[in-house]
Image: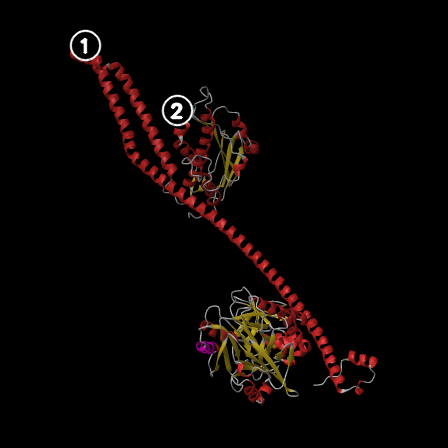
Amino acid sequence: MQVEQSLWTESSGWQPSPLGNLGDKAQLVLLFGSPAVLKLGSYRPDLKQAYPKADVLGCSTAGEICGVQVTDESLVATAIHFEQTQVRGHAIRLEAGESSLAAGDRLGRLIEPEGLAHVLLLSDGLHVNGSDLVRGILPHLPAGVTVTGGLSGDGDRFQETCVIWNGAPEQDIIAALGLYSDRLQVGYGSQGGWSPFGPERVITKSSGNVLYELDGQPALELYKKYLGDHAEGLPATGLLFPLSLQTQRGDRRVVRTILSVDEATQSLTFAGDVPNGVTAQLMHSSVDRLIDGAIDAAETSHQGMNNATPELAILISCVGRKLLMRQRIEEEVEGVRDVLGTETVLAGFYSYGEIAPFARGATCELHNQTMTITTFAET
Amino acid sequence: MTLEPHRLLQRQIQRYLGDSTTLPDDWQKFLAAVSDAYYQADGDRARIERTLELSSQELLQANTQMQSLLETVENQVAERTAELTLANAELATTLQELRETQGQLIQTEKMSSLGQLVAGVAHEINNPINFIHGNLNYASEYAQALLRLIQLYRKHYPNPVPAIQAEIMAIDLDFLVEDFTKLLKSMHIGSDRIKQIVLSLRNFSRIDEAEMKIVDLHDGIDSTLLILQHRLKSSSGSSGIEVIKQYGTLPMVECYAGQLNQVFMNLLANAIDAVESRFLSDKLDISALSTKGVKSQPALEAKIQGALRRAQPLTAIQNQTAPTIWICTESLSCDRILIRIADNGFGIPESLKQRLFDPFFTTKPIGKGTGLGLSISYQIVTKRHNGNLQCNSAPGLGTEFWVTIPTRQASQTAD
């Protein structure tokens, strides 16, 4: 596997310039960028010229990861030449009125299962229920093959996200990339670093991923109380207090983060299901704990590699973490690098939701507020 | 929005760099980043403090609510327990009443059946015995006439023909004449006795008396004694039970006579059981003791000595070496009478006295007693006659029951 990375900013253009050396050999370019920069579209001829035979998979973000650097208002292109792996991707548009489960099912049917080693999934970040999307896709995958990926972002604006599959960036797109190989080692890990605090509350009124009431009280009111002055920054500042949900089986917790608020109904829309009757607890964290979470995720992912050194790591981390860590955000990427080593190319983005099993052998789920890492190596 | 540099940073710049406005742009950006980090640290601390404060408030509130809920639950449990205890007590009372009612029904039914049987037997015997008793006088007269005629024949025909002489010899005419008169007299006594028994049976059963009647209670006691006579008199291998009667002058008493007879029957039967249990099972040598049976005693002394006498029965009979039952009646006042029935059996242990009047309580072997006698008697005396039934027992010496009842009843129903 050969990997090369380029960063585009308005002030500096592509660095390095011209773009890389893989040329025709690159089969895949992962492209993560801010919605505004993606809309400019000037990157397209550059990529086409540099990697004429590569498929381009990407999305809008709330921050781009290039090595240990985290940037905003930029583009990061990661070109990959697989020596033992083929890539075949599919994208669908979420139809009006179509459920995320149905969309997942529709996309899952397009994925050729023969020889499939892994699926990378990028989805619209505002109109898709990530939990349902994953539930729709999973039944179509062969045993032992899973999905990792994330929901696209829009900075801290939560207004417009887009996904790219070999064309212009578009809203309501869900793209899945199949990696076909018997020589590809894939590891994954997903950890948060958030801790529940305060009283446990029961979700007394909700619908899908919309939360109306906790313990019979309006959920938005509770968030505003805790946010204080930061309430003006909702929905973004709601990310400072993710919600921990006890799964229905009660064996473990999942984390949900806010996508939007509705003052009229005093409701909050989350990036995944918030089922009625489930016990919920507010969470908080600190910079150090989030860094520890990222390190844990990297270790988990590394352990899944059967001692192979990762050549590429795709880091999908939640926008909520970036909001909390702000200037120190790169420290979590550095923590990952410290675990994986300097040989591993780090690419990724800050998302509105992460998709992965939290560890090997577990069921793939939508996560929020986590650092979710997928590591690859060809043997 | 561009914020003022953080206050701390402003002071630090002032102290170490002087006027910051003269610094190059790169330094200005650097200082802005530092200022932003200061603000962020402040914000983080404030958020954590706020989070801590709010969550501890919420937890405290939840704790208070929990405690309040706990208290409410505890109160509810206490109330429920009290309700259950009350309901339980009511159930126990109801059960007791049911058992009493059941006992009364059983005994009433039993006594009613017994009364009907006794009344039926008395009625059936009454006619033939009247027939026998009435004709006995004629039979006696005819016999006397025939005997006189035989005497006359023998006077005027001293030497009858040999055949007659032979027959006179064969039938032993002289003995026949003498014994025939005795025999008739004996038959007369026997039929009198049967008539008396029939009368007593009818008196005892009082089957036709559902209404209050004014009666002489001595008649009831005597009738009961007569019915129990077979248990009082001596039999082979054992002496009889001596009954000492000390009847005072009682006014006529308004009562349910049949029911009071039932009380006397129960008390006397228990007394007989008690003395039998002590004397007859002990196989005492009682051959030398009295077999007098029922013995009447003179009337009681003056009422002024009543209190003294009340202590008398037990002390009077405790030293008796023969099985003895003592019956004493007296008028306590113009409207209340007392009947005492005492025995010199084993007495009742203190531990059993409490339960003596409980329905179905018995110390007798299975099949011997129903445990209803005293319970029914208690109901009859206290509830039907507004009287009182008490037990006074000295273990090892004997037992005495006191029945006091008013001579007149306030409006009572025969329910």
Please state if B258 lies on the left or on the right of A199 as rendered: left
Q: Is residue A320 above or below residue B334?
A: below
**As displayed, is residue B35 above or below residue B281?**
below
Q: Position of residue A50 (x, y in %)?
A: 56, 86
The label number, if any, that marks residue A201 in the structure image:
none
Select label 2 or label 1 by which is in front.
Answer: 2
Residue B100 position (above or below residue B72): above
Label 1: state its secondary structure. loop
The picture places residue B8, in percent across and down from the top left corner, at: 78, 78
Task: Assign the magenta stretch its main secondary structure.
Answer: helix
Amino acid type, mark 2: Ser
What kind of colouring is applied to the model shown?
secondary structure
Q: Nearer the viewer, residue A87 or A96?
A: A87
Disc assigned to residue B235: 2
Q: Is residue A16 magenta?
A: no
Q: CA distance from mark 2 to mark 1?
A: 52 Å
Crowd rating for badge 1 (residues with CA inside 10 Å; few <14, some 14–19, many 20+): few
Residue at the spot x=74%, y=77% of the render? B38
Q: From which residue to which does the magenta span run? A: A101-110
Q: In the rendered structure, which disc, 2 or 1, sits on the residue that comes first in sequence?
A: 1
- Label 2: how many Cα within 10 Å (few below 14, some 14–19, many 20+): few
Which residue sits at x=74%, y=85%?
B26
Mark sitting on residue B159: 1
